[in-house]
Image (cartoon, grey):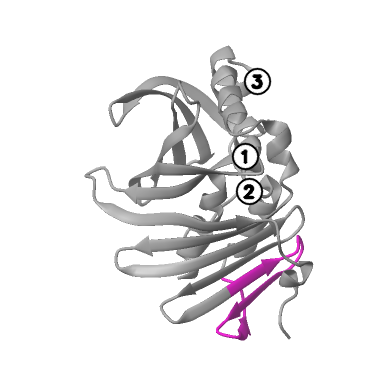
Amino acid sequence: MNCIRKAVGLVAALIAFSCAAPSLAATNEYYTSAKAKEVIDGLIKAYGGADKIKAVDRIKMVIEDAQQGANAKITLYQTKSKIRMDVNAGGVAATEIFDGKTITAVVNGTRQPAPPGHQDSLAEELREGPFQSGLLEVLTGKDRLLTYRGKKTFDGKECDVIERVKKANEIYDHYIDPETHREVARVSHDADGIEVQKVESFGEFKGVIYPTKMVTQKPNGIVVRTFKVTEVSSDFDESVFNAAP
């Protein structure tokens, strides 16, 4: 699911979500708990396996983002060393390009300073890698804080739950179906409260499984956002990372 969430965070800030590397002393139970390792390894295998996931080293994704009456089109380009995000929403066309050192932001054809935190956000996305590579990083990275929380029920289905602490006030519960080994939902706890991101459908690209539609809702069931992937490819020229003069 990580590939869609790359776009989710940056779009929220462009149109105030900011990613950051973990700041806590981290213990990843993937390396200390047999059950945590079993669940995470099962997910990675179900998504195509580490080798296939790593083999997708460049990606273009087009995403439709609908939230409470506002619609946006997001186009993400990413390689191992560069990333570009285009967002078109409400008459605003915004682009951010990061080459690992410098961020360039363009809004409606005019260069502007990037919003605070955006360079750190894009640097984190590069660290995680293109497409589903982020799953490997956030679930098996030795500096990640992960804990197996046992079985919990989601939509009437008993799931294995992996808790991931990103920051002191940002926690994610990954609900993983023990039969398909796919992540069916992710519950986020942060300063804005609790949100549930549910996967409604999956697709496949070069042997790698990824979510094609996700719905975000509040605990009371009110839908606040829907993401739908409409295009996935590796067909783009490196010139997309060149900012206009």
Residue on which disc 1 sits: 208
The percent position of residue 148, horizontal first and vertical second, equals 49, 22
Image quadrant assignment for residue 155: top left
Nearest to the eye among marks 1 and 3: give it: 1
Which of marks 3 and 1 precedes in the sequence? 3
Alpha carbon distance from label 2 to label 1: 9 Å
Residue on which disc 3 sits: 31
Q: Amino acid at mark 3?
A: Tyr
Task: Decide which of 64, 191 is in the foreground and name it.
Answer: 64
At 31% across and 48% down in the image, what residue appears? 217
Q: Which residues are magenta?
A: 95-115
The percent position of residue 197, horizontal first and vertical second, equals 39, 44
Q: Is residue 119 left or right of residue 213?
A: right
Is residue 96 part of the magenta span, yes or no? yes
Q: Are marks 2 and 1 in contact (CB under 8 Å)?
A: yes
Image quadrant assignment for residue 24: top right
